[in-house]
Image: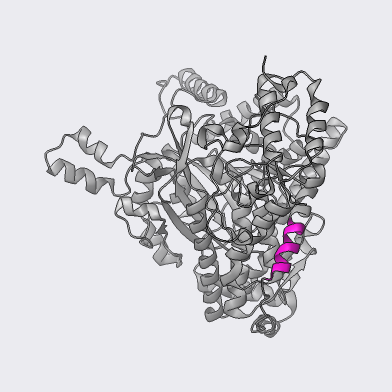
């Protein structure tokens, strides 16, 4: 049975079962849309669906989905348009994708419930351990996260040295510009990102080379105001100066009171030790007022104060997307000779860039019109890429920060803002795409093999295994995951304290909050940056101590390479079977799904099958198309404001009990 066909009598029974209920006009319309979509002929979904189609398995179609009846449950937001191509039905490729909101993202994108974090810049990051995370960058001084931490690898001792000096001294790679949107700024892809560039673009929403443009305008006889406008990219970032949190306001009052009590002018700078004492006392008071008890320790107090001082409303300057491979890849990279290490770095960069190009084509949207009602494609990405070598704990951790500017253009050239909701919703699929690409790149370049593992850090944590390189000693991955171990230990402590206080285990939402706290409270001060040669020498010594000797390390690396596993063919039978498996796996976690969920699972299945790198995209597209056409039923229509109503839908008659009065 095709997924979109349905028995007419079944539809009548479904409607009759609902006809006695009291529906709002919106509820009746929602069910009407669901009924029309589900009663279409089989050919209606031969292509990828348009808009926000939701799907369910064919065996579930007798029970209509619960209509949205509350403002707390709005219709899914339309964020894309999928159109057919001239390919046969089994080989249809999507042009855009649709998305489902995700709350948080778990390790290796293996489930959709996990831990987030709140950064010191006052923004929330959705974190996937070892794969990809999204971190919102705030306007104003939010860009300093890039210059102070991202651009210099979280260094705390850079002082006033320039980025060029820092890179030269520590051997870090300078940031590079990436994205099709650079053409509008007259910047070359791959050119170096400077500190001035980041201040202008992420701090002020101006052209990265604002000074050059403004000086040229002044030389041409323009006024200062006109010169400033010449470098502005669309609307100026909003400033919320009068919206200071209560904690900050009370802190300021106590500083003033201290000065007046000591005969000083009220604006006199308060000594650092006095400021620290005032803030600690105030933090204890606020914590006691909110929780009815004192903080457990300094970490809990510090996390509470960080949250209490966070600006509640801030403009968004951009997003930090962080890509990192699984731990065995970073381990092999850290211990291999430089030639092999460079191949691993090249594979990582190729996977990141390919994922970003797909993001640019399928995920990058903006909104225009009153209230941002209309969603349109953005012309191109503007991003700075920064690749780093280790984690805060000094463990080897190859990863790349991609600082995506919030400034994009629509097709008319007008500067607007990125529709950030799409980036968050796209996280799982982008992560799975990166995972698949780097695995395929490493197999093609170095002949490594991958296997599913449920041991080590992921044992008992995720529903699915993580694919790691065969031959990399698991003891190294465990030893070089100190950060994760610290977070998990702290999370268990907080969960135990919660149960002791409330007499019950935390709910799912409360558990996520505790995980966020654990991430924040275990955040260490960044170590002094080291040159790459020093890092590699230290890592080799650590590995030798763990597995026996330096020769054992070299033997391990040698055993991992040169296997050249045979690539598997993409047959019609494999596509059909995999599509069925994809829907079955997605249906285990949710009653309804969108193309987005199917694509993420299809990436996982393709990765495990060992498909050639050159055939991956087509294989995933075929699986998703088959999963929709053969194993899913569409039960809601796209937003009628953004697509044409088909003639077939216009002929549909709505039963009287469901019609508006």
Q: Residue furthest right?
A: 503
Q: Position of residue 134 (x, y in %)?
A: 57, 48
Give the left or right position of residue 401, taking residue 188 as reference. Answer: right
Q: Position of residue 316 (x, y in %)?
A: 47, 38
Residue 580 is inside the magenta segment: yes
Residue 108 is inside the magenta segment: no
Front residue of 287 and 418: 418
Residue at 51%, 71% in the rendered image: 346
Residue at 51%, 66% in the rendered image: 349
Which of the 4 quarters of the picture holds residue 652?
top right
| Total marks in image | 0
Q: Position of residue 102 (x, y in %)?
A: 66, 42
Q: Position of residue 103 (x, y in %)?
A: 67, 41
Q: Residue furthest top?
A: 661
Give the left or right position of residue 85, taking residue 651 as reference. Answer: left
Quadrant location, the C terminus: top right
Front residue of 242 and 569: 569
Depicted 8 relative to depicted 171: above or below: above
Residue at 23%, 49% in the rendered image: 212
Describe the colour scheme in one phrase. one colour
Start-end of magenta stretch:
571-582
Depicted 283 relative to depicted 179: above or below: above
| Residue 334, visible in the rendered structure | no
């Amino acid at each position: 049975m095709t997924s979109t066909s349905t028995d007419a009598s079944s539809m009548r029974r479904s409607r009759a079962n609902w006809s006695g209920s009291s529906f709002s006009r919106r509820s009746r319309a929602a069910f009407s849309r669901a009924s029309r979509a589900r009663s279409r002929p089989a050919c209606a979904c031969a292509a990828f669906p348009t808009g926000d189609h939701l799907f369910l398995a064919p065996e579930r179609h007798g029970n209509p989905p619960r209509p949205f009846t509350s403002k707390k449950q709005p219709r899914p937001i339309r964020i894309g348009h999928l159109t057919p191509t001239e390919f046969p039905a089994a080989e249809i490729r999507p042009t855009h994708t649709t998305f489902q909101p995700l709350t948080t993202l778990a390790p290796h994108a293996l489930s959709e419930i996990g831990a987030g974090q709140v950064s010191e810049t006052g923004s929330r990051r959705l974190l996937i351990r070892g794969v990809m995370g999204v971190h919102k960058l705030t306007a104003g001084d939010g860009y300093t996260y890039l210059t102070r931490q991202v651009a210099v690898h979280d260094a705390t001792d850079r002082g006033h040295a320039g980025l060029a000096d820092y890179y030269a001294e520590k051997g870090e790679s300078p940031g590079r510009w990436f994205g099709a949107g650079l053409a509008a700024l007259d910047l070359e892809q791959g050119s170096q990102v400077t500190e001035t560039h980041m201040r202008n673009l992420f701090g002020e929403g101006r052209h990265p080379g604002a000074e050059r443009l403004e000086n040229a305008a002044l030389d041409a006889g323009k006024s200062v105001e006109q010169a400033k406008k010449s470098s502005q990219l669309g609307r100026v970032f909003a400033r919320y100066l009068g919206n200071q949190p209560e904690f900050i306001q009370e802190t300021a009052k106590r500083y003033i009171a201290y000065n007046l009590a000591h005969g000083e002018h009220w604006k006199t700078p308060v000594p650092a030790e006095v400021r620290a004492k005032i803030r600690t006392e105030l933090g204890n008071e606020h914590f006691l007022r909110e929780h009815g008890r004192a903080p457990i320790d300094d970490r809990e107090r510090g996390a509470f104060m960080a949250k209490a001082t966070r600006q509640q409303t801030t403009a968004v300057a951009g997003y930090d997307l962080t890509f990192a491979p699984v731990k065995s890849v970073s381990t092999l990279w850290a211990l291999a000779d430089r030639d092999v290490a460079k191949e691993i770095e090249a594979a990582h960069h190729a996977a990141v860039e390919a994922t970003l190009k797909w993001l640019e084509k399928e995920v990058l949207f903006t909104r225009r019109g009153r209230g941002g009602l209309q969603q349109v494609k953005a012309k191109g990405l503007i991003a700075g890429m920064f690749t780093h070598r280790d984690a805060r704990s000094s463990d080897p951790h190859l990863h790349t920060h991609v600082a995506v500017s919030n400034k994009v253009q629509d097709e008319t050239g007008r500067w607007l803002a990125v529709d950030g909701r799409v980036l968050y919703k796209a996280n799982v699929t982008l992560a799975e795409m990166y995972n698949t690409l780097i695995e395929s790149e490493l197999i093609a370049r170095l002949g490594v093999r991958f296997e599913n593992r449920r041991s080590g850090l992921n044992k008992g944590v995720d529903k699915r295994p993580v694919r790691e390189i065969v031959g990399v000693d698991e003891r190294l991955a465990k030893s070089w995951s100190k950060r994760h171990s610290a977070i998990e230990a702290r999370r268990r402590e907080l969960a135990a304290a919660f149960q002791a206080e409330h007499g019950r285990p935390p709910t799912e939402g409360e558990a996520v909050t505790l995980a966020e706290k654990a991430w924040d409270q275990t955040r260490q001060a960044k170590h002094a940056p080291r040159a790459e040669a020093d890092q590699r020498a230290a890592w080799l010594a650590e590995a030798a101590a763990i597995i026996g000797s330096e020769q054992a390390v070299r033997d391990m690396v040698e055993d991992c390479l040169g296997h050249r596993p045979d690539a598997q063919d993409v047959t019609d039978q494999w596509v059909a079977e995999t599509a069925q498996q994809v829907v079955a796996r997605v249906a285990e976690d949710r009653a309804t799904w969108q193309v987005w969920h199917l694509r993420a699972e299809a990436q996982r299945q393709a990765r495990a099958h060992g498909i050639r790198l050159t055939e991956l995209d087509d294989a995933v597209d075929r699986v998703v198309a088959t999963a929709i056409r053969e194993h899913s039923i569409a039960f809601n229509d796209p937003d009628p404001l953004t697509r044409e109503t088909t003639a077939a839908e216009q002929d549909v008659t709505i039963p009287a009990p469901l019609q508006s009065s």
